[in-house]
Every structure is written in structure tokens, then in C-alpha cells.
Image (spheres, rainbow, N blue to C red):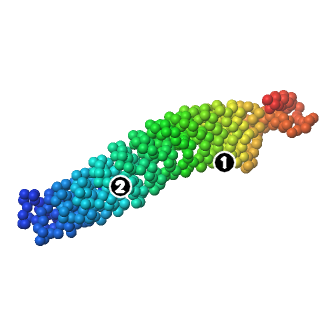
């Protein structure tokens, strides 16, 4: 509705000035009359031939409408007595609407003095004052207010008021004019958004202050149940957030998605705003309707300073989202190693699983993250834990053909027994490796030609650990007798010493 065009037929034109007028050079068709008005020249009429009030162009405009739209005040003054000032074009626009929209205050005054209705709306339900506010026409607004325009008029379709329009578009000069004229500060549009919400959403600090000083409701919510504080936070408008917090709003109300202002700041990675909200009493452990905690949102943003700030405020490091992921899962998947370290400092539960059955270690291995995998192993993450497919850490490392990951997982000899533990398909890590044209295990334990050779290399450690694991089972009743069958010179005494050492390791 901002750009309005008039379509005309084309033809040869003959123009003349006021001094050249005579009955012989009166325009011969309507188009020529409108073209003269377009050029700012008053078309003299032969009253026996022309009915000026009946003239309309292809857009339904009268000559008065066209002159008002183009800002030709002198022509308006000469036509205003001959043409009905309430005549509209096909869009429902009067001469007054045109003059107000385009900012011609002198024409507005002339039309109002001639009896133009100040409240006549266009087809969309907007009045002259609403259009003057939308286009930032302060002089026109002054005239309209002087003639008692209704400052609290509400748009029929959108519920907007002049104050909401001016506030949302950041027109600092208009807002105090409207407030002084009696504009109601807490009127809302059809979505419930007030002038304060609109101003905060766009970061218009001075207007926000005007509205607050005029009694704007701090905690009003509009579209999607968003408050002024939430929208200022979303836009990262720090001065506006500070101005709102100074009035002590409710910082813990949430929108339709369950997000508080702090949740929004965490999601966007806005450290400074988050600090202000925490200082104002924002809850740190709320979750949105998708199960995302504020800490999880901060992790997703990748902002380590924000994550540390929340952890210092005792954010729940083990909180799960709707997919069972903890902040540690998210940090590993995002490859944020600095955030992983910050989370591990708070001693999270390393054995929590997501909906796929993955622990933090399993996620790190699936992502082939050697550094994080080594860190998790050193912190005691269990290698024996399996995902929903029954795969343990060694299944994943050998299937990924990663020698470095496999070495990290086998640094403790007692974990070699996991090489023979099957998944739900009956596959063991050892069988997965043996199916490869280039097995990894021989490169770790040395070359071998047959399975017997491998058992001779791995057997003492692997089988010794298995037996030690069985013996250390707390539910077994003592005494317990175990028999070892071995050929002469098989190294049974070496196996016994390995079992003894493994049992000491398990008991620790």
C-alpha cells in the first residue's frame, strides 16, 4: 500500500499555462486534464463542455485526489469547491488520505477546513493519522491532532494503532506527540503486542523509555507469548534489555516454546545479556517444550564463556533433552573440545545414554574424535557399555578402521577381553577386524600368521583377564576352585601370574 500507481492511456498532449488559457486551447480529453495536474498546471474549464466533478482517471481518482497526492496546493485550493472532498479512488483513498500519506501538511489543513472527514479510512481500515504515522509525517500529525483526530483508532484488520505504528517503526518525534494527545500506551494489536513490545523488538531505546515513563506494562506478552524483554534479548539490544531490567520485570516468564529470556540469550550465545538476566534472578535450570535445558542451548551456541557462566550458577550438567542427549553429548557432536573440558570439570555422569544408546565415549568414537575419546577413557568412561545395537567401544573403533582409537581403548590389558564380546548380530570386535583385508590388531600386537599365533600373543592377557573377571564376581561363593588344562611347556605359570595381576587391578 506504500506504492500507488495510476494507469493512463497514451496519446499526444497539448499543454498550456494559466496565462495562455482561452476557449480555443481547452484540453480535448480527460487524460489531458490529469496530465496538466500531474505537471502542476491548473486546467481551465469551459463549463458548457466539462463537468470537473465527474472526471476520473483509470485508477478512479478525481482531479482533486490527484492534486492532493502530488502536493499541488494551489490546484487543490482551486478545485476544493468544485469536487466532493470525500470522493475516493478504487482503493478507497480520499484526497485527505493522499495528502497525509505523502506529507503535505498545508493541503491536509485546506481539506480539513473544507470539511473533509478526518476519520475516513481506506479499504484496509487505516485513517489519515495512521498513514501519517506510518510514513513519519510529524507536521501532518500535528495538523491532524489539532483537528481532533482519534489518536486511539484501531486498524480493522491488524489491530494497529497510531502509537503502535510509530513505536514499531522507530519514529521518535511522533511517539511523544501521540502520548501527549492521549494515546493509550497499553493498547495491543490483534496478536496482543503493545507499543512497548514493538519498540523493544526493533531496539528503539528512546521510544522504549518514553513508553515506560508513560506507564507501559512491562510483562505484557504478544505474538507467540513473547514479552518486550524476550524480544529485546532476541535482537541482542543490550541497552533496551538494561532499560527493561531496571524496571524489574518478571525475567522467568516463557513464550509458547517454553523459552525464557535467559533461554533465548543462551541459544543465541549472548553472554552480556545472559549475565544481566542472571543478576536479575533468572532461573538457570528451566527447560523448553522440546526438553532443551538452558545449558544445552548455550552448548549449541558454542560460546565457552557463556557455558562457564551457567556452570558456575550450578546449571545441571546431566540434564537430558527430548532425544536423551546431555550437554556433553552435544558438545562432542559439535566438536567443541573446550566446552567438553569445561563440562568434564563438573564431573558429569559419563554413562548416561541418548536414545540410540550412546554414552559420551561411544559418541566420541563414532565421531572419530581421538582427543576426546582418550580424555574420556582417562576419566573412567566404561569401554564395556554398549549402544542399542550391542556394540561396545571396540566394535566401533575397529569398524571405523581406526588404529589410534583401538590403541587408546586397549591401553589397559584388562579391556582386551572385550575383543571377544559379541553384539546383537553375533559380531565380536575381533571378528570385525579379521574380516578386513588389512586387520588392525596385528599392527598393535605384532605380526601373526594364524589364529593360534594371535592367541599366543593375546591369549595370556585376554584369557587371563576373562578368568580374573569371573573370579572377581562379587556374587560368587567361596571357596572357588578353577582348573587350568595346559600342555607341558605351555606357559601355565605365566598365565597364573597374569591372572593374579589382573585380579589386583579389578579389586582396585
The first of marks 1 and 2 along the sequence is 2
Residue reaching furthest to the bottom: 48
Mark 2: few/some/many CA within 10 Å (<14, 14-19, 20+): some
Instruction: Measure the C-alpha gap from mark 1 to mark 2.
Output: 59 Å
Instruction: Specify the label residue 355 is tagged with.
Output: 1
Q: Is residue 455 above or below residue 80?
A: above
User: Helix or strand or loop: what does disc 2 sit on?
Assistant: loop
Q: In the image, residue 198 lies at what x, y percent?
A: 43, 48
Q: Is residue 102 left or right of residue 278?
A: left
Say which residue appears at 43% left-offset and 41% top-offset. Answer: 213
Q: Position of residue 228 (x, y in %)?
A: 48, 45
When asked about the image quadrant of residue 157, the answer is bottom left
Q: Quadrant of the N terminus?
A: bottom left
51 or 58: nearer the eye? 51
Residue count near mark 1 (Cα–Cα under 10 Å), binned few <14, some 14–19, many ≥20: few
Q: Who's the residue at 34% across and 51% down the image?
A: 134
In this rendering, the answer to whether 430 lies above or below 96 is above
Disc number lying in front (1 or 2): 2
Helix, strand or loop under label 1: loop
Q: Does residue 434 appear left or right of residue 477 in this picture? A: left
In the rendering, at what x and y percent does residue 427 appear?
73, 46
Report the side of 405 relative to 422 (left or right): left
- Residue to which mark 2 is pinned: 150
Residue 89 x, y percent position in the rendering: 28, 64
Amino acid at each position: 500500500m506504500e506504492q500507488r500507481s495510476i494507469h493512463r492511456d497514451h496519446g499526444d498532449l497539448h499543454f498550456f499555462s494559466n496565462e495562455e488559457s482561452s476557449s480555443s486551447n481547452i484540453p480535448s480529453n480527460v487524460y489531458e486534464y490529469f496530465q496538466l495536474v500531474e505537471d502542476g498546471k491548473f486546467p481551465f474549464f469551459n463549463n458548457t463542455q466539462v463537468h470537473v466533478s465527474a472526471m476520473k482517471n483509470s485508477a478512479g481518482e478525481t482531479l482533486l485526489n490527484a492534486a492532493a497526492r502530488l502536493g499541488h496546493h494551489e490546484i487543490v485550493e482551486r478545485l476544493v469547491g468544485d469536487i466532493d472532498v470525500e470522493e475516493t479512488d478504487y482503493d478507497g483513498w480520499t484526497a485527505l488520505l493522499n495528502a497525509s500519506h505523502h506529507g503535505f501538511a498545508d493541503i491536509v489543513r485546506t481539506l480539513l477546513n473544507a470539511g473533509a472527514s478526518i476519520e475516513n479510512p481506506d479499504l484496509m481500515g487505516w485513517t489519515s493519522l495512521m498513514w501519517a504515522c506510518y510514513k513519519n509525517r510529524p507536521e501532518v500529525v500535528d495538523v491532524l491532532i489539532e483537528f481532533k483526530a482519534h489518536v486511539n483508532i484501531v486498524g480493522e484488520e491488524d489491530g494497529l494503532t497510531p502509537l503502535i505504528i510509530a513505536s514499531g517503526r522507530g519514529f521518535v518525534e511522533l511517539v511523544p506527540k501521540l502520548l501527549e494527545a492521549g494515546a493509550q500506551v497499553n493498547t495491543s494489536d490483534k496478536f496482543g503486542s503493545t507499543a512497548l513490545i514493538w519498540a523493544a523488538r526493533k531496539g528503539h531505546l528512546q521510544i522504549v523509555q518514553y513508553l515506560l515513563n508513560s506507564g507501559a506494562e512491562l510483562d505484557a506478552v504478544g505474538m507467540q507469548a513473547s514479552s518486550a524483554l524476550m524480544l529485546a534479548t532476541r535482537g541482542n539490544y543490550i541497552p533496551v534489555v538494561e532499560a527493561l531490567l531496571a524496571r524489574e520485570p518478571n525475567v522467568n516468564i516463557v513464550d509458547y516454546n517454553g523459552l525464557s529470556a535467559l533461554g533465548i540469550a543462551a541459544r543465541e550465545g549472548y553472554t552480556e545479556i545472559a549475565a544481566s538476566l542472571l543478576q536479575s534472578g533468572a532461573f538457570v535450570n528451566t527447560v523448553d517444550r522440546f526438553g532443551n535445558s538452558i545449558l544445552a542451548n548455550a552448548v549449541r551456541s558454542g560460546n565457552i564463556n557463556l557455558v562457564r557462566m551457567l556452570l558456575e550458577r550450578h546449571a545441571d550438567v546431566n540434564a537430558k533433552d527430548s532425544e536423551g542427549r546431555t550437554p556433553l553429548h552435544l558438545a562432542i557432536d559439535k566438536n567443541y573440545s573446550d566446552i567438553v573440558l569445561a563440562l568434564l570439570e563438573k564431573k558429569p555422569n559419563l554413562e548416561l545414554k541418548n536414545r540410540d544408546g550412546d554414552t559420551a565415549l561411544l559418541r566420541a568414537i563414532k565421531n572419530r574424535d581421538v582427543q576426546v575419546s582418550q580424555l574420556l577413557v582417562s576419566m573412567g568412561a566404561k569401554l564395556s557399555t554398549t549402544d542399542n545395537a550391542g556394540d561396545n567401544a571396540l566394535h566401533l573403533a575397529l569398524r571405523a578402521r581406526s588404529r589410534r582409537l583401538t590403541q587408546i581403548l586397549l591401553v589397559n590389558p584388562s579391556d582386551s577381553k572385550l575383543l571377544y564380546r559379541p553384539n546383537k548380530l553375533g559380531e565380536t570386535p575381533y571378528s570385525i577386524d579379521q574380516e578386513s583385508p588389512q586387520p588392525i590388531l596385528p599392527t598393535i600386537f605384532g605380526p601373526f600368521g594364524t589364529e593360534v599365533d594371535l592367541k599366543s600373543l593375546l591369549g595370556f592377557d585376554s584369557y587371563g583377564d576373562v578368568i580374573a573377571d569371573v573370579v572377581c564376581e562379587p556374587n560368587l561363593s567361596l571357596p572357588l576352585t578353577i582348573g587350568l588344562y595346559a600342555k607341558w611347556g605351555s606357559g601355565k605359570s605365566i598365565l597364573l601370574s597374569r591372572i593374579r595381576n589382573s585380579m589386583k587391578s579389578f579389586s582396585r
